[in-house]
Amino acid sequence: MTDQIMLKVERLTKTYATAAGPLTVLREVAFTIEAGAMLAVVGPSGSGKTTLLGLCAGLDQPTAGTVTLNGIELGRLTEDERALVRNDCVGFVFQNFQLIPTLTALENVLVPLELRGSHDGEAEARDLLARVGLGDRLGHYPVQLSGGEQQRVALARAFINRPKILFCDEPTGNLDDDNAHVMLDFVFGLNRERGTTLVLVTHNHELARRCSRLIRLRGGAVVTDEKVLSTDSTDGPR
Amino acid sequence: MNFILKMAWRDTRASRRRLVLFSLSIVLGVAALVAIGSFRDNLRQTVENQSKGLLGADLAVTSRQKLPDEARAYLAGLGGETSRETAFSSMIVFPTRGGQTRIVQVRALEGGFPFYGEVVTAPAGAFANLRAGDQAILEDTLLAQFGVKVGDPVRIGEATFTVAGALQKIPGESPAVAMLAPRVYIPLRALEQTHLVQAGSLVRYRTYYKFPPAFDVEGLVRDLRERFGGLQLGYDTVEHRKRDLGRALENVHSFLSLVGFIALFLGAIGVASAIHVYLQQKVATIAMLRCLGATSRQSFAIYLVQGLGLGLLGAGLGAALGVAAQLALPALFRSFLPFETDVFVSWGAVAGGMAAGLVICLLFTLLPLLSIRRVSPLLALRSGFGEEPPARDPLRWALYALIGAAVLGFALWQTDRWQRGVGFALALAAGFGVLTGMARLIAWAARRWCPRRLPFVWRQGLANLYRPNNRTVLLLVSLGLGTFLVLTLYLARESLLREFRGSTGEDRPNLLFFDIQDDQLAGLEALVRSAGAPERQEAPIVTMRVSALKGRPVDEVLRDRTLRMPA
């Protein structure tokens, strides 16, 4: 982990307009993450974890406050400009895998590179898929893969563009215990290997303890922000 | 661009058959436009190639009296060939068929008519025998109707002729003429033997002229109108026939093209609906692409390429079907055309039909595609909870305006008067508006007044009329416009047929005795009454000539070119 700030969140607030009136799901959340750090965001359902992840990744715009990702203030960008930032330095792993069903495993992994016009990433894509144990499933479609295998394809896709920061939203939420452990080993292993900053949203406290820092949300506000003794974090136990 | 094309192709993997099915929506509309346009071009070319066959001569001069000597001498002095015809209605008697009779159009002919085109008879070459002796050429329908054979005698007036052959086609007239008044050709020199042309007879005299090549026939007609305006002569030229035929054909073409366009319009509505449903299934994919870094333009372009491909496929299949269908059209219209149509592929019509299909399909595909711009990458994380409803989209209204302009543009292109084009577009818009309003009213009424005591199945069914993503408006508009199209065609057909049939009331007569002489009237009345057929109407026929119109002498009216009175 370095002292460079990868993600800076200041007074972040998000309010939705609903039929029943305005609904505030995040209230003045603030924190910073150094490059290479591993942050877990935990909290009960409805605490604003996923909303916070979406705002940090530039998938949504806050009602108030700022998000600065890799030195770029996302609020100043258009939707398309944020998309380009995501392609350049962000990786995603979602709870529901979110593979494109009409693409093979290899094609799914290559999409981020193809979006930026790069045509020479196939060797790396094959290598990544082999690393996650799917070297012989390159031509299979998501419907032909199990849940765990799909999530591993999603992980390979997340790392193909060498992201500076990886956002994971309940990456093991739809997996059984065995697949979940395998998946997490891959996540933390690749993360450690490449020095990627990790933001992990989960309500699994055991998983959260594998990160170096833990932010607890409740009612849209930060309740605690603490460092964690973890063997997986790049800066070692403290 | 490479990614867009690749992604557009790969994304269709699971749904190519469905997309092909969507594209079939516009196939029939494109096929109709291509077939009708090609047939029109074929006809135009045929008219140009066979224009002289439209009349069989360069000039035909018609009158109710024999052509005056001064006019005949003037025309004879211009050089060329002449052919004379005397025509009138009379009864023909078939002695070999028990004396059965039929009213026919007797044409007593002399000279080399037709100078252009050929007369088709069975047996071939029978028309030449008209000059050889007391022969008659009968309409082939007469031979079939009365079982008459070549060589049988027929009587016209007091003269007997031998049937030399059956007339199948003659330049200058369509075969449909035979339905109204079957023709019988006899030699002009034998006319006197019939004793049918007497004082007071309704006879038409026609003289055909063939002039040297490059002769200015139109100029001659203008000159003749000046010189002999008081003689009430009628003039018919190849140019007149081309213009009349062209006008009739253009009207038919415009009508059928507008019908084909409505079919295309309906198909495009179907495509838009199908694409809308298809895109709803792609929202997750689009959201994921946006997450991974695709811009809204890239996402939009992927599905625009799919829409274009769909349109190209439909337009291509439609054009192929249209080219095949055009081969059948000449056979359908053969009875109404005075010539055989040359059939060739009109690439202009193919291109026009395909372009119309592609443009309309693209415009309607853009309607659901516009929603892609608003697909948020956040949907990859969660569903639409908390999303604000979309604001009014100026681009959507611009697209509606484009569609309206395309409809209006096509209508103006097909009709020769802008009033008709505007009227067609407005009628279509009005129909669209009424059906949309009705659909919304039905959905509102279902939501407002659905009885709670109805069985579950009924309540669910009625609720689907107004639930989110319902298809009420689309289905009602499609069904309504389709019904409108079919009903328009049916009403137009009935209107045209009524013109021919006349009123079909039970009290209308179905038997007409014509040209009854004074001394025959009482006997005929008694005969008809004894047969149990009540007499409906008795009308004297008096031959008259108009001498003045609204106080102005006829000669003066005919000389007044501003009135455009026919001779």
Image: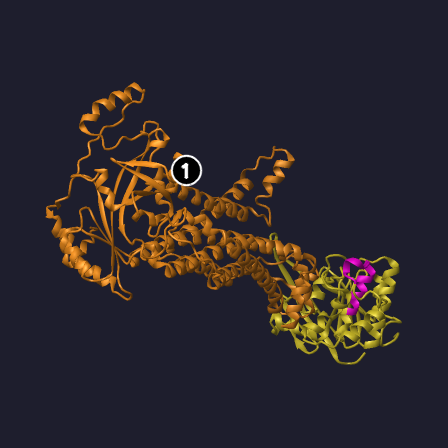
Based on the picture, tell me whether residue A142 belongs to the magenta stretch. Answer: yes
Region rendered in magenta: A140-156
Residue B21 left/right relative to B45: right
The residue sitting at the bottom extreme is A3
- Percent x, y for residue B95? 33, 32
State whether residue A203 is above or below residue B451.
below
Q: Tell which of A178 and B482 is nearer to you.
A: B482
Q: Residues within 10 Å of mark 1 (few under 14, many from 20)?
A: few
**Which SS does the magenta portion mostly show?**
helix
Q: Looking at the image, which residue is at 21% across and 26% down?
A: B520
Quadrant where the image shows the N terminus of chain A? bottom right
Residue B140 left/right relative to A66: left
- Percent x, y for residue B379? 67, 60
Give the image quarter of residue B415.
bottom left
Colour chain B is painted in:
orange
Q: Tell which of B412 and B428 is nearer to you.
A: B412
Residue B39 left/right relative to A53: left
Q: Chain of mark 1?
A: B
Q: Tell which of A168 and B18 is nearer to you.
A: B18
Q: Secondary structure at mark 1?
A: helix
Colour chain A is painted in:
yellow
Q: Tell which of B156 and A100 is nearer to you.
A: B156
Residue identifier under label 1: B144
